[in-house]
Image (cartoon, grey):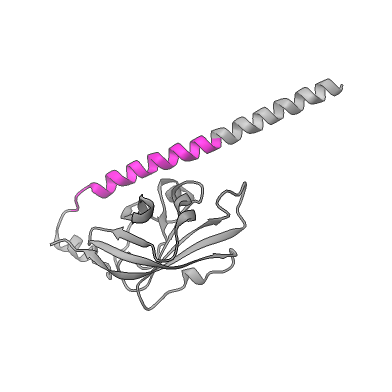
Amino acid sequence: MRARIQTLLSFLLIAAGATLLFIGARDYFGARLGQSEAARDFEQPVPQTVETRAAIQPAAAHRFALGDTIAKLKIPRLGAELYVVEGDNARELRRGPGHLAGTALPGADGNCVIAGHRDTHFRVLKDIREGDDIVLETQTGQYLYRVKRTQIVTPDNTAALRPTATPELNLITCYPFYYVGSAPKRFVVEAQLAGSVQRPS
């Protein structure tokens, strides 16, 4: 009887390990595939009609459809380059960091909020620090943000989502980064617009 229990426990442990390995591999390769698709979308030229020229202005009221690639996010010191999609639902976050609908667009006045998974796209945030540059490249140009601070908060702390009068960027992910299961806290990177790196002619 004891041998049977040990055999059953061994089987369950192997099955659990295989399941975790499968989930990890699925998330990893799914994230990479999603970024490849987002990159292709981002590189497609935008027809320069009167409507699109007005729509890509950062302060405009134009909003993207869920899943659209809206920006390329770069953190030069960390060598990170990620494509940001519109929306923060599970489907969008599998493709890449998601811009919260209703928050400011990159480069515009207000609070631009981008969320991402700690175990895939936003794992890189574990090494970010005060003073780091974050560049958001859009169809409008490239906008330079500088990290003001990082903080660890509880999920009910929504200060990072509040509208602001000045151009700000908040990157949000779960914390701790290597926590097994649903992480109990949130890691927030707060940055302020430092200037426009480049604008198209």
Question: Is 118 inside the magenta-drawn segment?
Answer: no
Q: Is residue 47 left or right of residue 89?
A: left
Q: Quadrant of the C terminus?
A: bottom left
**Percent of width and height locating residue 75:** 36, 56
Q: Of all residues shown, which one is farthest toward the right?
A: 1
Q: Quadrant of the N terminus?
A: top right
Q: Is residue 69 left or right of residue 92?
A: left
**Percent of width and height locating residue 63:** 32, 62
Q: Is residue 18 visible?
A: yes
The vertical placement of 87 against 131, above or below, is: above
Most foreground residue, 134 or 70: 134
Residue drawn at 37 percent across, 78 percent down: 165
Residue 138, by quadrant, is bottom left
**Percent of width and height locating residue 114:** 42, 60
**Percent of width and height locating residue 104:** 36, 68
Question: Is 45 inside the magenta-drawn segment?
Answer: yes
The magenta span reads 23-46
Q: Is residue 116 left or right of residue 61?
A: right
Q: Which SS does the magenta portion mostly show?
A: helix
